[in-house]
Image (cartoon, rainbow, N blue to C red):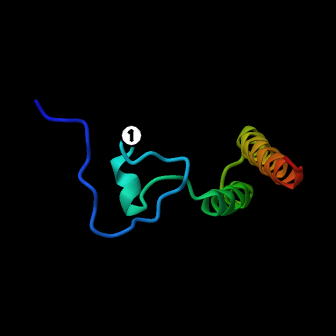
Amino acid sequence: MAGTQLEPSSSDPVVAAHVDTAEVPSAAWGWSGEAPKTFRFLGWFFALFLLLMIIGNHTGRVEDLWLVGCAGLMVVVLVRDILQRRKPR
């Protein structure tokens, strides 16, 4: 039966302190965690993209309401994230 121990690597990997390489083996190569700046950028990009989709060839206003509502929800979540990051912990 195979053991649960991992072999140590020859180089010192850059691993976040809260990630255990025994639980997440890919963390040893730096493939663990999130990219918060990328997610925030994409959030603002897609909120703007949804608003730009209002310009189009559709005649009904229901589509516009959904686009504005979804973009507004994304902006609320992004602003809430900004406010939470400014609070001291």
Q: Is residue 53 left or right of residue 79?
A: left
Q: Is residue 17 left or right of residue 83?
A: left
Residue drawn at 58 percent across, 59 percent down: 35
Q: Is residue 8 left or right of residue 16?
A: left
Residue drawn at 55 percent across, 47 percent down: 18
Mark 1 is surrounded, within 10 Å at the Cα level, by few (under 14), some (14 to 19) or many (20 or more) other residues, namely few
Quadrant that contains the N terminus: top left
Residue placed furthest toward the left = 1
Residue drawn at 73 percent across, 43 percent down: 70
Look at the picture and state if 56 lies above or below 58. below
Residue 57: horizontal and vertical position, in percent? 65, 56
As rendered, which of 80 and 66 lies closer to the eye? Answer: 80
Residue 31: horizontal and vertical position, in percent? 42, 58
Q: Which structural element holds mark 1?
A: loop
Corner quadrant of residue 43: bottom right
Corner quadrant of residue 28: bottom left
As rendered, which of 61 and 5 lies closer to the eye? Answer: 5
What amino acid is found at the position of numbered circle 1 in the picture? Answer: Glu
Residue drawn at 78 percent across, 46 percent down: 68
- Report the residue marked by disc 1: 23
As rendered, which of 33 and 76 lies closer to the eye? Answer: 33
Residue placed furthest toward the top = 1
Q: How many marks?
A: 1
